[in-house]
Amino acid sequence: MKTSRYFLQRLIYGFVLMLGVSLLSFTLMVWFGPDQTYELLGKNPSAAQVEELRESLGYNRPFLSRYGNWLGDMLQGDLGQSTRNGEYVSKLLSRTLPVTLLLVLPGFLLGNLFGLLLGMAAAWFRGSVLDRLVLAGSVAGLSLSFLVIIIVLQILLCTPYGLNWFPARGWRVDGLESYLFHVTVPTLALILVSVGYNTRFYRAVILEELGREHIRTALAFGATPAELLFRNALRNGLVPIITRLLYSVPLVVVSGSLLLETYFGIPGVGKVTFDAITSGDQPVLLAVVTLTAILFVIVQLVAEAGCRLADPRLQNQ
């Protein structure tokens, strides 16, 4: 009963928070977002043309009326139409989101997996040569710019100046082989840019768990390193790990895809967002900003639920 009441409270809290986030996103876009009046009309429009267009775009309506209409449409799945090409925003996002997920998920998962394994090895052999090498590699990875990594990999793997094994731009995927052909270089870029951060984080988490009393007790009773690392340290460190993983998802999907898709010319959400920024496509920008903020709220609720399941002690709080 206590757990059910807690989750009901969190759902209500999440709904109120998402409503507030949508209002804030809409307010920022209305007051600070691009005004497309003169971009759509061209040079030297008449006053009547300006007034007519602003009326059709809804710029002249009261703020609360605009927000209410937009919120009602959004709850029905209608995110408006792109002023750039007239395509419905919901259709645009449903077409590009799968491309973004296919692009960033391999690098996100592998970057965390490699970071976890390296962090566990460095924590177990703390102070050793391996630990120092892992930390040095992590620092080197932290110092590299994502854009620099992308450019170097593209030159080495995608041009005649290097191996020329993979395409420099584009996304023509019609099967597993073509998918691997196009996703390899972006995946390597995501791994290289994230493995340094991930390794240092996982090393710190595992190192803290290895210093606890029950680990020393299990070691005294003959537990193997694998048992200590995976069954004890990793399991007891799930709360910060789950939190980090879930909160990284919106950042990777939006910010990671923005640079990768723009640079490699891949038609995903990041490329659509970049095009909307450069062209002032307000409906697309408003949809992306609002849905990203709502995704953060959902991630927060899921992270809380996952942490309570991973650590039964939190269920009594």
Image (cartoon, rainbow, N blue to C red):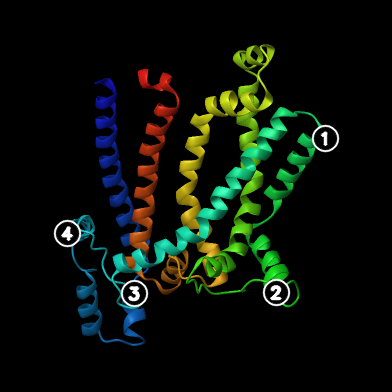
309, above or below 217, in the image: below
The residue tagged 2 is 164
**What crowding class fits label 1: few (fewer than 14 Cα within 10 Å), some (14-19), or many (20 or more)?**
few
Q: Which residue is mark 4?
A: 65
The residue at which mark 1 appears reads as: 129
Q: Which is more N-terminal, label 2 or label 1?
A: 1
Residue in view at x 36 percent, y 80 percent: 39
- Mark 1 falls on what kind of element? helix
Of callouts 1 and 3, the N-terminal one:
3
Q: Earlier in the sequence, mark 4 or mark 2?
A: 4
Q: Quadrant of residue 119?
A: top right
Relative vertical location of residue 36 with respect to residue 69 in this rendering, above or below: below
Position of residue 139 in the picture relative to residue 72 (left or right): right
Q: Nearer the viewer, mark 3 or mark 2?
A: 2
Where residue 33 appears, as percent x and y from the top left, is 37, 64
Q: The residue tagged with tag 3: helix, strand or loop?
A: loop
Which amino acid type corresponds to the residue marked 4 in the rendered image?
Ser
